[in-house]
Every structure is written in structure tokens, then in C-alpha cells.
Image (cartoon, rainbow, N blue to C red):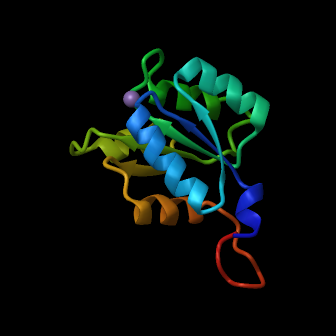
Amino acid sequence: MGREMSIKILYIEDNPQNMRLVRKILGAAGYHVIEAVDGESGFRALLESQPNIVLMDVNLPDIDGLELTQRIKSNPELASIPIIALTANAMHGDRERCLDAGCNGYIPKPVTKLNLLSTIASFLPVDQNSGSAV
Ligand code: MN
């Protein structure tokens, strides 16, 4: 554990099963998970909590996750927060569509523990003492 406790991850997701899975994986790893079930409440949570990373479901009930990503990235005060898209559309070109919208990373569903934790770690600063991600 250790410094993961100070890392805040906002997960915007309307599917309860995905939310439960990601909450379990990230919670066990010691991350502080903030949850939102749609785009508008996710945007408010982002402003309030200033997370270190956002996990963005692309298919949300109110706004498209990629549209919300563009809104965040067009705000200079929020643009530096890494956004990782999660999408069930394993179509060809889907990764490019997410990156074009401004997402910094991409995780295809179904989410695996290894892929989730390694992708998140790649967006965190490296701990100088241990050489591992904080
Ligand atoms: Mn969804």
C-alpha cells in the first residue's frame, strides 16, 4: 500500500457490475475511488474532487463519454488530468476514436485487473525510492 491512498481516481460508469469490479480492484490496490453514474454528475465530481486520473465509460446515459472528454480537455484548468477511456466497442478504429477525442489512454472491456492496474500506473509519477509507480 502506501501512497496509493493519496491517489484519487474518478470512475464515471453507469453499469453497476463494471463499477463493482473496478471498485474492488482499485480499492484492494489502495486507491481512493470516486464514483459517478452519468456524465453530468461525473463532471461535477471532477470539479469537486480534482482527481489524479479519470476512468471514462464511453457509453453513458446522458452525454457521450467522448463528448465529455472533449469538454474536460477544452478547459485549461482540467486539461492536464489524464483520462482513460473504457469501452465495450472492440471495433477496429475505436482506440483511435478515443484518442482523437482527447483521451490519454484506452482500456477495452471486459476490464482485467492486470490491464487496469498497469494502465493506471503508467499515468502516475514514478517513486524515486522504489522505482515503482506510486
Ligand atoms: Mn455505459
- Of 25 and 13, the residue lying toward us: 25
- Of 12 and 31, the residue lying toward us: 31
Question: Residue 121, relative to residue 78: is it above or below?
Answer: below
- Of 88 and 105, the residue lying toward us: 88
Quadrant the N terminus occupies: bottom right
Question: Can see residue 77?
Answer: no
Q: Position of residue 23 (x, y in %)?
A: 53, 47
Q: Position of residue 20 (x, y in %)?
A: 47, 42
Q: Position of residue 39 (x, y in %)?
A: 54, 22
Tell me if 77 is positioned left or right of 28 in this view.
right
Question: Residue 89, relative to residue 8: is it above or below?
Answer: above
Residue at image point 48% right, 32% down? 13
Quadrant the C terminus occupies: bottom right
Instruction: In the displayed orientation, state which residue is furthest to the left.
Output: 92
Residue at image point 71% right, 84% down? 130
Question: Can see residue 113?
Answer: yes
Residue at image point 70% right, 62% down? 4
Q: Which image quarter has ligand 1?
A: top left
Res. 68 image quadrant: top right
Total label count?
0
Q: Position of residue 30 (x, y in %)?
A: 65, 60
Residue at image point 52% right, 25% down? 37
Tell me if 19 is positioned left or right of 122 in this view.
left
Res. 18 image quadrant: top left
Res. 15 image quadrant: top left
